[in-house]
Image (cartoon, grey):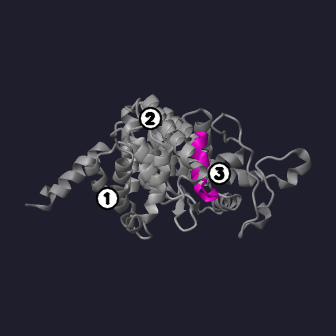
């Protein structure tokens, strides 16, 4: 068998045919024109995940002025010919904010970028693309503007003839571990791209008052939208069969794959899922209030510390398993007893302790909750 006839080579050839690409360069000025003519969609909703500081933005503009090549920008061509930006948000948004063209998701102009002092171009400090007459000395000179507008962008284009899921796969691969730091932030962007209604639904559930009172996340967890990850976990894992729970290798990737598939198929029953979620959170809050997902100390006879994902898996996914049944009720005393008994359960402490991976934990915690709150 020749190397070209191997199963691996056959797979490579097949998948390569499913992804059609093109590439060419254009000036920043041309790209700005495409944006203003709505021929490229940078998904302004993504700007909530746009984390570059003013210093990072200024350093990027410095690099352009110094002639340092801009890393490739990836776009996907839609059936209507419009390009969807799938990688390069920070770079593109910085340029558009500098020139005063950037708009937010409400189609309102974002405040233009005020540059900071940079290592090689300290006189950039306080400069803007345009200034009123009385501050013209702090306006970028025409020569600098031309350097920026004439700088080249290398575009990599996923053509519309590709597998429809190709751009989502590419987006995920390019952004995971990059400036968009967490799995959930990548999921948020994928949901916005694939099914905006589903993204709004997830956000609506995350705003439920009792849920927010019980999770009490840190500022960093809030910024990274861990609240939305908890909603995704509830939606994906609530009804999952135990054999599937045991088969999960990487929980983050599993959640991404499942929520993406659901978004593409548009098969989620919003009202059923909303009812199950709200009912679950109402029961838990009525029984435990803000202590619902904290550790219970049997010696001090009270809850301590912050949010614990293992407790969320037992309580929220245990009650939630049957919460969409109209005749399902759960007693507050039972919820309190289950919560307190977890810390007397040697298996629970061993299987949820430090160093235990999520893929090892959830085949235990979720079935435990279902058993505790079963018929």
Give the residue number, with chain letter if any, for mark 1. 249
Q: Nearer the viewer, residue 88 or 183?
A: 183
Asked if the residue at tag 2 contacts the one at tag 3, i.e. Cβ–Cβ closer than 8 Å, the answer is no
In the rendered image, the vertical position of residue 309 relative to residue 211, given as above or below: below
- The picture places residue 348, in percent across and down from the top left corner, at 39, 63
Q: Is residue 175 visible?
A: no
Q: Is residue 17 left or right of residue 35?
A: left
Q: Is residue 226 left or right of residue 218?
A: left
- The picture places residue 23, in percent across and down from the top left corner, at 43, 48
Range of magenta residues: 207-221
Report which quarter residue 120 is drawn in.
Answer: bottom right
Give the residue number, with chain letter if any, for mark 2. 273
Mark 1 and mark 3: span between their CA atoms?
38 Å
- Quarter occupied by the C terminus: top left
**Residue 213 lies in the magenta stretch:** yes
Q: Earlier in the sequence, mark 3 or mark 2?
A: 3
- At x 74%, y 46%, the residue is 112
Count of numbered tags: 3
SS at circle 1: loop
Give the residue number, with chain letter if any, for mark 3. 94
């Amino acid at each position: 068998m020749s190397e070209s006839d191997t199963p691996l080579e056959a797979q490579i050839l097949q998948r390569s045919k499913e992804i059609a690409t093109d590439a060419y360069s254009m000036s920043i000025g041309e790209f700005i024109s495409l944006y203003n003519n709505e021929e490229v969609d940078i998904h302004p909703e993504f700007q909530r995940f746009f984390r570059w500081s003013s210093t990072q933005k200024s350093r990027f503009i410095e690099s352009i002025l110094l002639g340092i090549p801009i890393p490739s920008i990836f776009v996907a061509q839609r059936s209507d010919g419009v390009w969807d930006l799938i990688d390069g948000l920070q770079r593109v948004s910085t340029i558009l904010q500098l020139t005063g063209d950037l708009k937010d998701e409400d189609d309102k102009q974002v405040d233009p970028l005020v540059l900071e002092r940079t290592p090689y171009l300290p006189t950039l400090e306080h400069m803007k693309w345009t200034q009123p007459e009385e501050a013209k000395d702090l306006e970028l000179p025409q020569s600098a503007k031309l350097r920026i507008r004439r700088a080249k962008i290398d575009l990599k284009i996923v053509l519309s003839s590709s597998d429809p899921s190709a751009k989502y796969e590419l987006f995920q691969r390019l952004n995971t571990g990059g400036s968009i730091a967490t799995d959930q932030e990548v999921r948020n962007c994928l949901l916005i791209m694939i099914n905006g209604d589903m993204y709004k639904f997830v956000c609506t559930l995350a705003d439920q008052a009792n849920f927010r009172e019980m999770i009490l996340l840190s500022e960093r967890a809030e910024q990274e939208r861990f609240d939305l990850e908890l909603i995704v976990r509830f939606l994906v894992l609530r009804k999952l069969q135990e054999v599937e729970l045991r088969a999960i290798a990487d929980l983050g990737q599993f959640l991404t794959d499942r929520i993406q598939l659901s978004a593409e198929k548009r098969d989620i029953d919003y009202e059923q899922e909303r009812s199950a979620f709200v009912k679950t959170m109402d029961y838990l809050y009525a029984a435990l209030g803000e202590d619902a997902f904290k550790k219970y100390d049997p010696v001090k006879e009270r809850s301590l510390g912050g949010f614990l994902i293992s407790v969320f898996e037992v309580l929220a996914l245990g009650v939630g398993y049957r919460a969409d049944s109209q005749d399902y009720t759960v007693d507050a005393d039972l919820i309190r007893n289950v919560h307190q008994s977890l810390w007397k359960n040697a298996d629970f402490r061993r299987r949820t302790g430090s160093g235990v991976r999520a893929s090892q934990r959830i085949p235990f915690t979720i079935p435990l909750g279902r058993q505790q709150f079963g018929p």
